[in-house]
Amino acid sequence: MAKIIVVTSGKGGVGKTTTSAAFATGLALRGYKTVVIDFDVGLRNLDLIMGCERRVVYDFINLINHESNLSQTLIRDKRVDNLYVLPASQTRDKDALSQEGVERVLNELKEEGFDYIICDSPAGIEHGAHMALYYADEALIVTNPEVSSVRDSDRILGLLASKSKRAVDGDEPVKEHLLVTRYDPNRVKEGAMLSTDDIVDILGIKLIGAIPESEAVLAASNSGVPVILQEKEDAGQAYTDVVSRYLGEDVPMRFLTPEKKGLFKRLLG
Amino acid sequence: MGLLDYFSSQRKKNNASVAKERLQIVIAHERSRRSHAFLPKLQQELLDVIRKYIPIEDDQVKLDIERDGECEVLELNITLPEESARG
Ligand SMILES: Nc1ncnc2c1ncn2[C@@H]1O[C@H](COP(=O)(O)OP(=O)(O)OP(=O)(O)O)[C@@H](O)[C@H]1O
Ligand SMILES: [Mg+2]
C-alpha cells in the first residue's frame, strides 16, 4: 500500500523542494517505486531541481482536468530507476487543485503500484498547502533553526492535527518527522543559532535528521541533480542518512557538531 | 580563547536561549488558543440557550479560560439585566 508523505513547513524558502527531490530520489535508490508531486501550482520548481524541466509536457492540473493520463504526464527519471516526477502547472493557480481531483490522482498512483508518494507543499497555510497535506499519512516538517520558521512549523503541526483527512476522519494521526535544514553547527556552538535539541524541545516531535548549510545544495540546483546524488557532499550524505532513518535503520546523527579543523582535523582523521 | 571572544560568545549564547524562551512562550500561547478554537461557538450556543429564559445582549455572556497551575478553568460570566435582577 502506497504511503503518502507531505514535505511541508509553512514558511517559504526553507528547503521543502530540495528535501522533496532528495528524499524521493533516496527512496527510489533503495528500490521503492516513488513519485514526487509538485503542489506549488503556478510556481513550478521541482522540475528544475530534478533536472527534468525540458521534458514537461503535461502537468498535475491537466491530469486533474482529464486533459492527459498518468502515463503521458509522469516523467520518468533518467538517472534513477523507480523514480517519477509529477510537475505542477505553471499557468494555473492553486484553486485548480480540486480536492476530488487530487484524491483521484493519488488513487490512480496507488493503483499504479507506487510505494511512496511525496508531496512537495507550497509555502503558506492556504489552499495549496492544505491540499498537499490533506491526504498525508506522514509529514516531513522542514524547519530552519530560526524563530519564524519554528513558529510556522508549529502552525503546520496544528493544521495536520485538525485539518488533514486523518484528523477529520478521526483516524490515527499523521506521523510527523522533524527535519532541520540549513543547520550551521558552528553558529549553534557559539550559541548564535537554535540547536536541534532546542527545536525538538519547542515543537515536541521526533528529529529525523539535520541537513547542514552547504554550498553543494546550490550547486546541485544549478545542475538539476538532487543533492542526495552528490555522495561526497555533507548535505548529500545527510539526506542519505535521513532516508535510512525513515526506513527504520538506526543511523547515528551526523553534522550536528562543528567539523574539526586544521592540524586537529589531520591528527584526529 | 581571548577575553573578548569569551564575552562575545557569551552574548551570542544569550541569542539562542532568548530565541528558545520566546518561542516556547508564544507557541504555548498559540497552541492553547488552537485547542480552544471551539470557544466562540460554545459562547454563541450558550447565549442561545440563556436567551430562552432571560433577555440578554451578546456582550453579557463572557467565556474565558484561565490556567491554574496544571489545570485549566473555564470561566462563564453572565451579567443579568437590571430588570431580571430586581425580579
Ligand atoms: N542545506 C542547505 N544549504 C544551503 N542552501 C540551502 C539548503 N537547503 C536549501 N537551500 C537553499 O534555499 C533556497 C530555498 O530552497 P527550496 O527551494 O528547497 O525551499 P522551499 O521551501 O521549497 O521554498 P518555497 O517555499 O519557495 O517552495 C534555495 O536557494 C536552496 O538552494
Ligand atoms: Mg518549494
Image (cartoon, coloured by chain):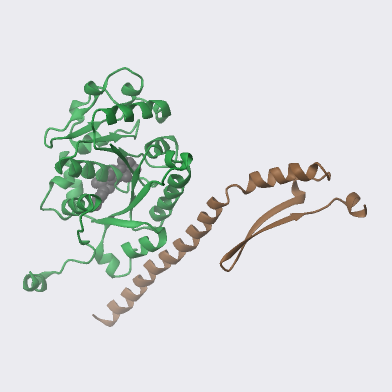
Residue at 58% x, 69% y is: B69
Q: Residue A201's image quarter?
A: bottom left
Q: Residue A65's image quarter?
A: top left
* Horizontal side of residue A262 vs A109, given as left or right: left
* Horizontal side of residue A34 vs B26, given as left or right: left
Q: Is residue A235 above or below residue A50?
A: below
Residue B40: x, y in percent? 64, 46
For the question of whether residue A221 can be seen, the reply is no
Q: Which residue lies furthest to the bottom in this view?
A: B3
Q: In this view, does B11 lie above or below A220?
A: below
Residue at 35% x, 31% y is: A41
Residue A55: x, y in percent? 18, 26
| Colour for chain B in the figure | brown
Q: Between residue A221 and residue A78, name the one nearer to us.
A: A78
Residue B3: x, y in percent? 28, 82
The C terminus of chain A, quarter of image: bottom left
Residue A158: x, y in percent? 46, 49
* Horizontal side of residue B61 vs B71, given as left or right: right
Residue at 36% x, 58% y is: A146
Ligand 2, by image quadrant, is top left
Q: Is residue A154 above or below residue A113?
A: below
Residue at 21% x, 44% y is: A22
For the question of whether residue A163 can be seen, the reply is yes
Q: Residue A241's image quarter?
A: bottom left
| Colour for chain A in the figure | green
